[in-house]
Image (cartoon, rainbow, N blue to C red):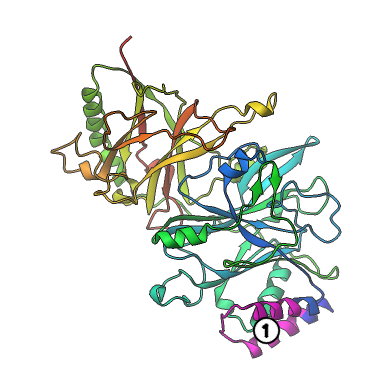
Amino acid sequence: MRKISILLILSLAVVLFSSDNCFTQESVEHFKKLLESQGFTVQEGSLYLFNPADLFGNYILPSCFCNNADSPYAVYLIPEGPGQMTPNKYPWTYKLKENEAIIYLGWTPPPMVYFSYQTFVAGRFYNDAFHRIFGNLGDTINICTINTGESIEEDTEGTSFNAPTIIISTPDRNTDAILRAEIARAGFDVGIVNTEVLPSALLRLGLEHDDDELTFLFRTAFFENEADREFYTSDPPLVGYKEILVKPPYQSNFRGWVFRVTPPEDLKSDPFPIPPLRVRATGDTSELELAKTMDRLREAILKEYESLQFSELKSYRWFEESYHGIQTITDVFGETRDTVYFRTDTFELSESGEDFVIVYGPIHSLTGKSIYSSFILYTGDIVKDLLPLQSRIMLGFLSVNSQMSEESKLGLKGSAKRFLPDDPNADLFYVWKIAKANPDNEDYCAVVPESNYERITYNELFVAFRAYIDPKLAVSAAYEEILMDKVIYFSQEK
């Protein structure tokens, strides 16, 4: 009977299809009622701003999870499923049955360099304990791949910004088919639908205590307009001091509507196969041809500071791949396949500013290997109030990136010319200093700021590097195609 019903819905959807993408409270409520008429339980959630520093600083989270300082995040706040007896660990983590779905109906952000949507395994119960994994479930729906309608703003007409979109996150083909049919019956264009397949073969789905908890991240980076950034990141606080302020029932906001959709019990489960992953490599190794320039830049830096002691910090690949992390119960800190990740060994800086680090390397967006690149300073200090539990702050709090203009002297561009004045490749490289003081007001010097939270300290530091999306692909470049950024620590003579 359920199969006949699905076929009937699909047939009606074809007949009643309309390409109207005008999301309103009334049209979305109509869509919700259509689902409920098919026996679905529909519960409202929210897509809400998520600030790791604020959540950690207010004693809600045990870590900042290696956040990207350039990336304001939003998360789904999802109510518990029907009949769920075990509470979720946080409002932004949730359990999901094998044929449930989370659906988002809303608009993409205003103009920016990068955005993406993606579900993660927040954690798994193993040997009677909850282990954080924070592993992605495949490729993102990102700025290069998302299906949208026409932008609703005149100044972004013809782009994928400010554009209506629908995202279905589900492990199940039957659920996806019914949702798509009801989307069409509601008068929305199925051409704007994006299905994010949750790979049930890798997940422990269900609502029981030992089943996986999931989470969802909406990443943004580098708003074109500062007013847009301020508006888009202006949600009321999610948390206060040791308290979560936003509680169910959740509500829609300017980003759109989020629903947890639970099918009737007689809907047979039909799990999706695991989708193929996007291929990272293009075979283009042209950035590696700049290795000799990188060597000359290193020599010029050492010459500039030849009166000082120095040590070169090792740069290395930061995270394990998420599918490996899921299998080995390893924390991969929300890594995405849209970027490569490198980091250095740790170091400490004195308050005087007499010791410092020099960060240098290629500007990957100018060499053609990314749409933007950055280095970010992190604190890896132990979280003392959680001892003997070993947790580290892992907050990215200072970023220098490829998006700032050369004239501003606030970004990567133009900062290597003083070291390579006659080198034609100098424009493709950067050199920055990091210290705890800058008494001479040097250009291209980042100063470690004062902490805004008593819980956040800046003692054990390291630098990490990202290069988002190879412009020839819809995913990052391969690691072996990247010329690695490096760091040198300098101190006074002993």
Work out whether residue 480 or residue 257 is closer to the camera in this orientation and state it.
257
Residue in view at x 58 percent, y 44 percent: 54
Residue found farthest to the top: 494
Q: Which residues are magenta?
A: 6-34
Q: Is residue 491 left or right of residue 51?
A: left
- Residue 101 versus residue 308 in the image, above or below: below
Task: Inspect the magenta stretch and tell me whether residue 288 lies in it.
Answer: no
Residue placed farthest to the left in the image? 422
Q: Residue 78 lies in what quarter of the image?
A: bottom right
Is 404 on the left or on the right of 141, as rendered?
Answer: left
Between 171 and 238, the one lying in front of the other is 238
How far from the left and from the top, in percent, is residue 390?
A: 65, 27
Please state which amino acid type lies under the numbered disc 1: Arg
Total count of labels: 1
Inspect this view and state whether residue 142 appears.
Answer: no
Q: Give the residue pinned by disc 1.
A: 185
Residue visible at 46% across and 75% down in the picture: 151
Considering the image in quadrants, where does the C terminus appear?
Answer: top left
Q: Is residue 313 above or below residue 201?
A: above
Quadrant that contains the N terminus: bottom right
Give x and y (percent) for residue 20: 56, 84
For the residue carrying disc 1, how many other residues have a C-alpha within 10 Å: few (<14), some (14-19), or many (20+)? Answer: many
Q: Give how far across and how far down residue 138 sits, in percent.
A: 58, 53
Element type at mark 1: helix
Which residue is pictured at 85% across the width and 68% down the height? Answer: 265
Q: Is residue 462 visible?
A: yes
Give the vertical position of 222 relative to 242 (above or below): below
Question: Which corner quadrant of the image does residue 26 belong to?
Answer: bottom right
Q: Is residue 187 left or right of residue 2?
A: left
User: Looking at the magenta stretch, what is its main secondary structure?
Assistant: helix
